[in-house]
Image (cartoon, helix red, strand yellow):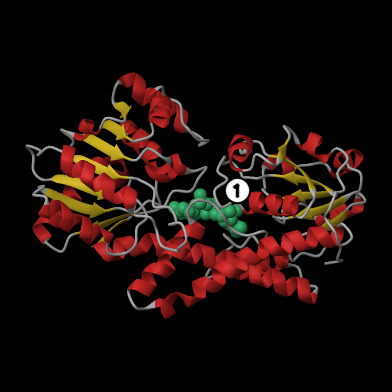
Amino acid sequence: MKISVIGCGYLGAVHAACMADFGHDVVGVDIDAGKVNKLAAGIPSFHEPGLEPLLRQGVERGSLRFTTDKTALAGARVHFIAVGTPQRGGSYAADMSYVWSAVDDIIANATPHPDGPIVVVGKSTVPVGTAGAIAERLAEAGVDAVVVWNPEFLREGYAVQDTQRPDRVVYGLPDDREHGEIGRAVVDEVYAPIIEAGIPRLLVNYPTAELVKVAANSFLATKISFINSMAELCDASGADVSRLAEAIGHDDRIGSKFLQAGIGFGGGCLPKDIRAFMARAGELGVDQSLTFLREVDSINMRRRDHAVELAAQMAGGRLVGVKVAVLGLTFKPDSDDVRDSPALDIAGRLWGRGANVVATDPAGADAVRLARPDLQIVDSADEALAGADLVMLLTAWKDYVELDPAHAKSLVSTPRIIDGRNVLDPRAWSDAGWDYRGMGRRSSSVW
Ligand code: UDX
C-alpha cells in the first residue's frame, strides 16, 4: 500500500522504516532538509538500536523515500501524522501548530484514491478532542477522508520493537459506523503483520484513543514519583527505597517495573505529556481530576533539587570550585536524547553554583554541546573521574553501572559518590572506601 508519514522525527522516522519493512511503499515528508537528506541516505538522525538496517534496506529496495516536497503526498491511500507536539513556550499546553500544518499539507497535496476515501492516521500525542477537529477540518475542505487515531507507545531504545510488536494497538474510530469500518479495514491492512500475530487490538472512539496515550504516560509518571516520594520518606526514616520497591513489587497488583527511585523522569514524553494533560483538563473544566499530576510533577522536580543539595552537603556546604565528575547526561541510557534530561539539568545547576563540572556520556555528548556549550564534556568516565572531588552517576549507562570502585578510587581526588539512579552496590562501594550516597538508600546497613 502507498503510505505517507508526515513528520520524520523520532516517531515518524521509526514508523516509516517499520512500515516499509512491512512491505509498503512509504514516503516520509519533513520540513527539515538536513534530517531528510540523512534519512534518504539510510542514516538515522538519532541513536536507536535496529533502526539503521531497516532504513538502509528500505532505501535500497526503493520502497522507502524521504523528501521535503509535500507534493509527494499525492497518490497515497494512508497518511500518518507523526509530527511533534512539544510543550508550548510559557504554558503547559501542547503546541499543536505542527499537527495543523500537517493537516493543511494533506488538504493541499493529497489526491483522491480509487479504492475509497483516504485514511488519515494520527499518531502524535495530542490533547483530547483533536481527532474530531481534524476530521471536521478535512470535511470542510472537501477532502474525502476517514480519520483514525492510533496512538504510539514506543519507548526510546526499543522503538523498532515497540512499533513492530507492540503490547497492543488502539484504533480511535469515527462514530459513523460505515466510515469507521473503512478506517479499521485499511489500518488492519497496513498493520497486517501485527494483526496476524494476534496482538490485542482495541477499537474505541476518538477521545478514548487520545486519552489512552496520556493516561498511560500519566500512570507511569505517577509510579515513578510515588517511589521517589517513598525515597524522601526513606531518607527521613533510615529505610532503603530499593529494598522497599523490591518488596512491594512482588505484589502482582503493583508490579516491579517503573519503581526505580532516583533523580526522576525526563525525556520528550512523560514531563510534557502530563503537563499538557493538566492544561487540557483545565480547558475541559475538570482540572481537579488531575491535580495529583501537579504533585507528580513537583515530586519529580524536587529530585533534582535534592541531588544538587546532596552534592553541596557532601562537598562541605559549597560547590564553588568543587570538581564534580558527572557520569551520564541523557534522560535515560541507550538514548542520545537530552530533552528535559534530569541529568543535564543537574549538571547545569551544579555549574551554575560554581562547581567545576566535568561530564561524560556515551551518546549524548553532541546534543549537550549544542544545548549547553558551557559544560565541559570529556570522552570517557576515566577522564571525567580524574582528580574529582565528587562523582555523580546520573544516567544508568551499563559502563557506569559496571564501574569498578577500586579502579575509580585510584583516579579521583576524594572518593565521594552520589548514585543518582540507585544502580550501584552500596556495600561494594562503601567497602572500597567510598562515601556512597544513593537516593533514599542506605549506604551501609546490615540488612
Ligand atoms: C515513555 C513511555 O515509556 C512510552 O510508553 C511513551 O510512548 C513515551 O514515553 P521514554 O520517554 O522512551 O518512553 O522513556 P521511559 O523508558 O518511559 O523513561 C522515562 C523516564 O523515566 C527516564 O528519564 C527514566 O530514567 C525514568 N524512570 C523510568 C525512572 O526514573 N524510574 C523508573 O523506574 C523508570
**Residue 17 visible in rendering:** yes
Picture residue at 67% right of the left edge, 63% below the top: 303
Split into quadrants, the picture shows ligand 1 in the one at: bottom right
Picture residue at 18% right of the left edge, 35% below the top: 76
The spot of residue 38 in percent (x, y) is: 43, 26
What type is the residue that disc 1 sits on? Lys
On screen, residue 283 above or below 136 = below
Instruction: Point out the image quarter for the C terminus.
Output: bottom right
Farthest residue in the top direction?
Answer: 60
Q: Residues within 10 Å of mark 1 (few under 14, many from 20)?
A: many
The spot of residue 228 in percent (x, y) is: 65, 67
Residue closest to the eye, 377 or 16: 377
**Residue 205 visible in rendering:** no
| Left/right of residue 326 with respect to residue 433 in the rendered view | left
- Tag 1 residue: 332
Picture residue at 84% right of the left edge, 62% below the top: 313
Picture residue at 45% right of the left edge, 33% below the top: 51
Farthest residue in the bottom direction?
Answer: 288
